[in-house]
Each structure stands twice: as structure tokens, then as C-alpha cells.
Amino acid sequence: MAEQLTHSQARRSFLGLAAAVGLSLALAGCQVVPKGKPAPAPAPEAAPTPVPGTGLPTDINRNRVAVLVPLTGPNAGVGKSISNAANLALLDTGGEAVRISVYDTGAGAAAAAQRAITEGNRLFLGPLLAEDVRAIAPIAKRAGVPVISFSNDVSVAGNGVYVMGFTPGQSISRVVGYARSQGIQRFAGLIPDGVYGRRASQELIDAVEKAGGRMVAMQTYDRSPQSLRAAVTRLNGQSSYDAILIADSGRIAISAAPMIRAADSKDARILGTELWKTENSLSASPAIRGAWFASVPDNMFNQLRTRYRARYGVSPYRLGSLGYDAVLLTVRIAKDWKVGRPFPESELRSSDGFAGVDGAFRFGGDGVADRSLEVLQVGANGFTTVSPAPRGFGQ
């Protein structure tokens, strides 16, 4: 849950924490009246004034927060999961100091952001896509509105924009570090063409160097079967390696693994990225069993999925947890956020971080969420944890 962590504090279930927060808010609304004295009349509430240019009432007791996600277009399903999970978080916590409004970026992110600002929102949760973040960032900056985006593109972070998505660099660094701890020395990379591949290749080189390993080979491909096969052939002709990172989806990994096993490096450990987490068919491929990859833990997300399904009748996309955690973080900070004042952005940079559905996280000076990841191994019956995610930072 988006509560502040201390190093010695054990993390509780997010559902239990949500219940505790809701209870405390309910108790805060109670008043003890001495016996024999009549209850004092409630103070009259000031009549809300409309937000200029919108006709909407000004919130006296709640801060307005905008959730910017695609509700139309090809990413509508993901956007709907995020927005539904965000509303579920508000219900679970009883976040009475926050009002959530959802804006569709599918019809234009800049227009959605401008409307959200006009309607008095002081914090943006979203958008999902990096290009949408780039479109709204200058609008939000002029209005003094921080942006907690759901993108995994670290290039959009900074200058009031925070990246909350699951970034490939952290996943690669974690699995490489674990592999080195298990005695693996020589690393190779199988990297797709494109922006994701270029960033993944540099992250792999940096992670191997940091972990004290040796980068011995790397090849790129264009995702066609012929190009993939040629890349594996070239890799095996370059040098022998102890582990090979397939920096792509689980579907591509399933295709590449038999080629790797059939070559001279058949005993090499296969490594993957956070993209593998949603590929349920990995376990059906004997060639990829025993592979390692790093991702956020699922224990609390499974509880969230049950709650989500009970309320909405369907299962959420895996990224729905970002909406839940973003609202939990907001509710936590909103306790000290005076209505009508700018969002206290400095609170986002707590050195101890926060705990959420996706585990512990904190925003670094670069605006990117640093996450505690677990390392998973692919087996015949699914994934098993071989290195648990740390409970907090500095542990």
C-alpha cells in the first residue's frame, strides 16, 4: 500500500491497511458528546462556488486528482483496468480527501490534460503512453501540476514528470545481479531492433559491468523467424557464454529457446525481462524451463484481482495495479495536502519509499520509480520465486 516505509517496519497486507485507513477515517468523523448536554448544531457549510469556465462546483473538502488513461482506441482495455483499479483503491481506503476524475487520452492527451486543469485538478495520474506524456508535460508544467505517469519509458521522466511503470532496465539489472551471485560470469544478449532493444542492450552492458561479469556477445534481430535464427547462429559463432538474455516478449523467447538449446551453448542459462510475466505459455516450452527473469511480486496483485473481479465482473490487466498504487500513494500524501493548495511534490521523494500492490518502490532523483523485484524461474507448472523481492530499501 502506498504508505511510507521504515526499514524495520514489516509490510502488512494492503487490504488490511486499506481497512485500517477506512476505519480511522470513519472514527475521525465521530464526535463524543457529554451526557446531559445537547449536541451542538453542525456548522453551516459554505456554498460551493463553481470552477471558472466549467460550471463544476469547487470542492471544499477534497483535492481533485485526474486519472489520464486511454478509454477508447487500441489501449482502452488497459486504460479501463487502470481507472477501475484507481476507483477501487479510493473505495478501499475511504480516501475522503481526494476526488478522482477520469479523462480519456484516446481522443487526444493534450486536450484531456487541458480539460483536467480547467476543472481544477492539481495532480495527474497517467498517462499510459510515452508520447502522451510528452504531449501533456508542458501543459502540466505551466499549471504547476505534477505528473505520475504509468509509462515505462524513462526518457520522459524529470521536470515534474515521474515514471511509475515497470522499466526494463531494473528488471535486467536484477536478473543479471542474481545470475552473478550464482556464479555466472560470461553473458550474451539477443536483442530486438528498435527503441526498446537499444535501451535494453545498454542496460545489459551496464548491468554486467556493475555485477562484475563479462559481456562476450550480442546480436540483434528484426523479429522475423529468419532474422531470429540468423542472430542465434551468429551468437553461437562468436563466443561461448554462460547466460543469454532474450530482451523481448515471452512469445519471442519461446521461439528462440529451442534454437539456443540446439547449439553449442545448449547448457547456457536463459534470462528474460519483465515482459515475460504475462506470457502464461512459457511453462509449456521445455526448452525455456529453468530460465530466470525479474519482475514485481504477484502476491498482493492476486488479492487485488479477486477484489476487482468481484466488483467489475472481469479480471484486470496486469498494469491495473499501477492505478491502484498511484491512488494509494495519493491518499497517503493527501493527509497533509491542504485543499486548494498545490500538490506537495516533495513528498514523492521520500527516501524510505512506499509499499504497494507491486511491492516496495520509491522515486529517485531522476523521477523514475525504483522497485524491489523478485527473480522467478520458469518451470513445468509455472513460475517459482528463487530470490524474493526485498521488503524495502537498504535491506
Image: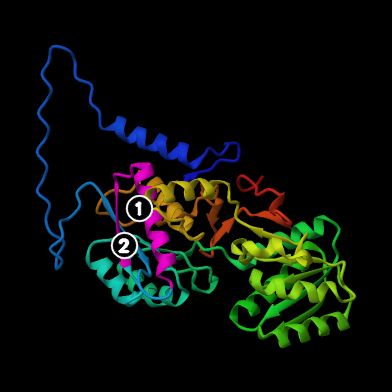
Q: Are marks 1 and 2 in contact (CB under 8 Å)?
A: yes
Residue 80 in view, yes or no: yes
Q: Secondary structure at mark 2?
A: strand
The structure residue drawn at horizontal position 38% and vertical position 77%, both measured from the top left corner, is 135
Number of labels in the image equals 2
The structure residue drawn at horizontal position 50% and vertical position 45%, both measured from the top left corner, is 303
The amino acid sitting under disc 2 is: Val
The residue beneath circle 1 is 87
**In front: 86, or 229?**
229
Which residues are drawn in magenta? 75-103
The residue beneath circle 2 is 102
78 within the magenta span: yes
> Which corner quadrant of the image does residue 289 belong to?
bottom right
Magenta portion: prevailing SS class? helix
Question: What's the CA distance linking mark 1 and mark 2?
Answer: 9 Å
> Which corner quadrant of the image does residue 58 belong to?
bottom left
22 within the magenta span: no
Residue 344 in view, yes or no: no
The amino acid sitting under disc 1 is: Asn
Vertical arrangement, residue 32 with respect to residue 133, above or below? above
42 left or right, relative to 180: left
How far across and how far down the image is residue 357, in percent? 51, 49
Q: Residues within 10 Å of mark 2 (few under 14, many from 20)?
A: many
251 left or right, relative to 148: right
Q: Secondary structure at mark 1?
A: helix
Q: Which mark is residue 216?
A: none
**In front: 161, or 247?**
247
Q: Residues within 10 Å of mark 1 (few under 14, many from 20)?
A: some
The structure residue drawn at horizontal position 15% and vertical position 60%, both measured from the top left corner, is 56
